[in-house]
Amino acid sequence: MTKSELIAQLAADNPHLRQQDVETLVSVIFDRISDTLADGGRVELRGFGAFSVKRRDARTGRNPRTGEAVEVPGKAAPFFKPGKELRAIVNGGPPQIILRPRRA
């Protein structure tokens, strides 16, 4: 599903909202997730998963053509870890709802 398909589907499911408003909402959500990750933060959506940034150290790589050693600089890469409910749905089972006892 592309971003435009997501916007169209959300607009169709919510006829009380204008498509332009749905487009703005989706863009704001994606922008906030991107900004948080760019700042080194973490975004957790309960039942869906968590977005975070993984740091990769600098290393010495090899050029596959020449076999020559090449320095590869360190970098950051976005990482997504799916939640239990999402994994259960993708694997064809019912979502597992985790109930935790209330603390007194």
Image (spheres, rainbow, N blue to C red):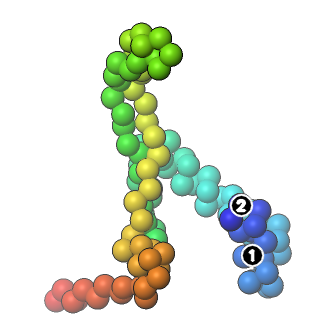
Q: Quadrant of residue 22?
A: bottom right
Label 2 close to label 1 by CB (< 8 Å): no
Residue drawn 21% across the image and 89% down it: 101
Percent from the top left, x then y, of residue 75? 43, 30
Q: Is residue 47 visible?
A: no
Label annotation for residue 3: 2
* Secondary structure of residue under mark 2: helix
Q: Amino acid at mark 2?
A: Lys
Q: Compared to 17, does 20 lie above or below? A: above
Circle 2 residues within 10 Å: few <14, some 14–19, many ≥20:
few
Q: Nearer the viewer, residue 63 or 73?
A: 63
- Going by the image, does 1 lie left or right of 64? right
Q: Amino acid at mark 1?
A: Gln
Residue drawn 54% across the image and 54% down it: 33
Percent from the top left, x then y, of residue 23? 76, 64
Residue drawn 36% across the image and 85% down it: 96
* Secondary structure of residue under mark 1: helix
Percent from the top left, x then y, of residue 88? 41, 79
Q: Nearer the viewer, residue 73 or 26?
A: 73
Q: Quadrant of residue 74?
A: top left
Residue drawn 80% across the image and 85% down it: 15
- The residue tagged 1 is 9
Viewport quadrant of the N terminus? bottom right
Q: Quadrant of residue 11?
A: bottom right
Mark-to-mark CA distance, 2 and 1:
10 Å
Viewport quadrant of the C terminus? bottom left
Q: Is residue 19 visible?
A: yes
Percent from the top left, x then y, of residue 66? 47, 11
Q: Compared to 66, does 98 lie above or below? A: below
Q: Compared to 92, does 30 lie above or below? A: above
Label annotation for residue 1: none
Circle 1 residues within 10 Å: few <14, some 14–19, many ≥20:
some
